[in-house]
């Protein structure tokens, strides 16, 4: 009986040791992990959309479209180390994973915003509107908005 308990405890400890802490998915003891963050908005009467993609390679891609103005803008750039550090320090994947938002403000001519974060072993997307509570990730949203505003054209 004692031997069975020791084996069971050993298996439980082994399983717990193999579980991955989500918080370490972007930055851990080994350094920066490969990641992509996609951030953008879409909806409204004119079919407006914009998206900013940030990659761990420091590459940035921005796209903005509007049917009403025939706008079709694409830009690529390289993020500075300061910009990337600000974004990385604002990412809390544990907190982000607790948000399960799937707004549809665009369904009534509003605008929805999305954030999608991917690493080799993590992927989570949220889509939020004006009335959703995103206060737990406000630092990340601020960093992404500031970066997106650098490329956005009115």
Image: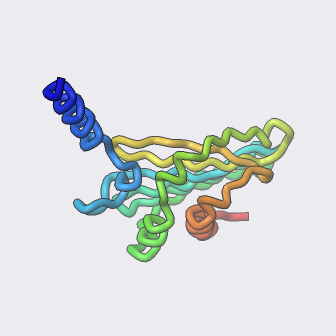
Question: Which residue is located at x 40 percent, y 60 percent?
Answer: 59
Q: Quadrant of residue 123?
A: top left
Tell me the quadrant of the picture where the C terminus can be found: bottom right
Relative to 82, does residue 42 appear above or below in the rendering? above
Question: How far across and how far down the image is residue 34, in percent?
Answer: 33, 52
Q: Quadrant of residue 43?
A: top right
Question: How far across and how far down the image is residue 119, in percent?
Answer: 38, 47
Tell me the quadrant of the picture where the N terminus can be found: top left
The one nearer the camera, 107 or 73, is 107
Residue extending furthest toward the front? 1
The one nearer the camera, 46 or 81, is 81
Horizontally, is 53 left or right of 146 in the view? left
Question: Which residue is located at x 17 percent, y 32 percent?
Answer: 6
Residue extending furthest toward the bottom? 82
Relative to 64, does residue 154 appear above or below in the rendering? below
Relative to 6, does residue 140 appear above or below in the rendering? below
Question: Which residue is located at x 33 percent, y 43 percent?
Answer: 120
Question: How far across and how far down the image is residue 17, in percent?
Answer: 25, 43
Q: Quadrant of residue 82?
A: bottom left
Horizontally, is 107 left or right of 115 in the view? right
The one nearer the camera, 9 or 152, is 9
Horizontally, is 39 left or right of 60 in the view? right
* Display coloring: rainbow
Question: How far across and how far down the image is residue 76, in percent?
Answer: 47, 60
Total count of labels = 0
Question: Which residue is located at x 77 percent, y 48 percent?
Answer: 111
């Amino acid at each position: 009986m004692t031997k069975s308990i020791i084996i069971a405890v050993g298996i439980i400890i082994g399983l717990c040791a193999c579980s991955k802490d989500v918080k370490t998915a972007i930055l851990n003891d080994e350094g920066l992990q490969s990641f992509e963050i996609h951030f953008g908005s879409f909806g409204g009467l004119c079919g407006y959309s914009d998206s900013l993609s940030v990659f761990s390679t420091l590459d940035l891609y921005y796209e903005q479209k509007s049917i009403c103005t025939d706008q079709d803008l694409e830009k690529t750039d390289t993020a500075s180390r300061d910009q990337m550090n600000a974004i990385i320090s604002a990412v809390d994947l544990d907190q982000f994973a607790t948000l399960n938002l799937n707004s549809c403000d665009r369904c009534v001519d509003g605008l929805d915003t999305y954030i999608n974060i991917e690493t080799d072993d993590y992927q989570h997307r949220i889509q939020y509107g004006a009335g959703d509570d995103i206060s737990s990730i406000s630092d990340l949203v601020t960093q992404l908005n500031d970066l997106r505003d650098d490329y956005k054209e009115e």
